[in-house]
Amino acid sequence: MHPKHLKIEDFTYDLPAEKIAYNPVNPRDQSKLLVYKDKKISENIYRNICDYLPENAVLVFNDTKVVKSRLFFKNENGANIEVFCLEPYGEAIDYEQHFLEQNSVTWICFIGKVSKWREQHLAKIINLDGTQVKLSAEIVGKLEDAYLVKFTWSPGEIPFGKVMDAAGATPLPPYIKRVAEKVDEDSYQTVYSENEGSVAAPTAGLHFTERVLNDFEEKGISSLFTTLHVGAGTFKPVKSEVMEDHIMHAEYLNITTDFLENLITKIQQPIITVGTTSTRTLESIYWMGNMIAKNPEISYEELKITQWLPYETEAVCTAEAAIKALVNWIKNTQQKHLSIETEIIIAPGYSFKIVKGLITNFHQPQSTLLLLVSALIGNDWKKIYKHALENDFRFLSYGDGSLLLPTK
């Protein structure tokens, strides 16, 4: 069956509110870990995850950094208006460069209480290292389900990344109905976060501490880091009855040639992704390389992975050949990295090309993230989730997690 014809009602379960984690575990690595291996379930904590990883395993982490993308303004009558920055507006966004921009930037945004925004500009004064900065926002366009907002600030020589960090709040998931606290600035960020751009955390990585990462190194388990900036679309529910009518959200990859060349040297080892975002990244890399292998002259615009491409395109090369083709294509453009969108949807019927296992949290019913889990381990997802619900595991972003190792 083509995944287009999957019914989302087949991927549901009852998630009581008391099973959802609204606050993190401290320390992080004391979170509960469900291990699915050889079709059997066992339990431990993340501190001991090394004991369950295959020999010579390679872990691939998403090192994106969550930005303080919730900006609050007041209108002339004192009403609060929230501007939730989703992603920079434009083609082929270089996030690193974007956060260095001065004077003004334009973002795609959700706006809370937009009907109360009657002024041309909303403005606020923020204190940035002792400097008074005036930040203004103006709606300059309307999209189907969002707005284009232009931000300007003075003094304009301050990089936008610093302005957003001083003016904004941590974007906790929408089901956490509380104001973000100071502690969330650290707890809703992985310890290895580096590249700014996400408006939601790659939550599978929230359980890892420096001591766990050190354990990997001591036990010969390789760690590779790449970047996919997580968008608010990760929380987008599937509202259509069949997947054909669901539009998959796009997210930005930033892939360096150094990462790809390291991945080539590890390609024969068991590659385990930390999170669904890392999974989407690696599998998108394969399909981009596969397209290049078929058409070395392919353009940047044609290289974007649309949601159904993997199901409607012939796989003509090995994972190693695909990665090498992508490395050569990037180098031929005189670049050291590729920043590009992917809309890939991984659902039952998908054939994994690079990923052999997954570390991930417990996801919402009827979500594309649950589809991805099912694509990897089949209907055993129901057995796993039943066990988690009956054994006091905590669900969703701040919750516990699992190590999923499908049988070969």
Image: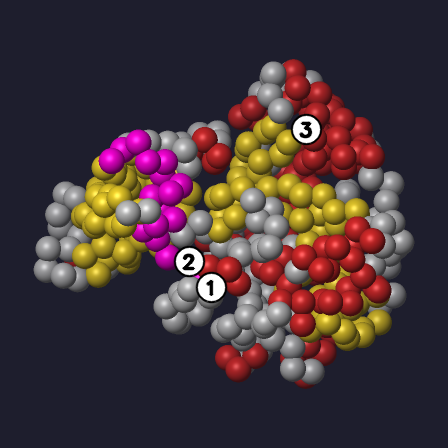
The span shown in magenta is 155-172
| Mark drawn on residue 170 | 2
Find out whether residue 156 is within the magenta segment: yes
| Nearer the observer, 240 or 209 | 209
Residue 304 percent coordinates (x, y): 57, 32
Q: Can residue 179 be seen in this view?
A: yes
Secondary structure at numbered mark 3: helix
Determine if residue 381 is in view: no
Q: Which residue is drawn at 38% across and 49% down?
A: 165
Amino acid identity at mark 2: Thr
- For the C terminus, give its image quadrant: bottom right
Q: Is mark 1 on a helix, strand or loop?
A: helix
Q: In this view, does 81 lie to the left or right of 404?
A: left
Which residue is tagged 3? 257
Residue kind at label 1, given as amino acid type = Asp
User: Residue 152: x percent and y percent?
Assistant: 25, 37
| Residue contact at pointers 1 and 2, CB within 8 angstroms | yes
Q: In this view, does 176 lie above or below 62?
A: below
Relative placement, left or right, of 340 versus 105 is right
Q: Residue at x 60, y 46 (%)?
A: 63
The residue beneath circle 1 is: 184
Q: In this view, does 128 lie above or below 241?
A: above
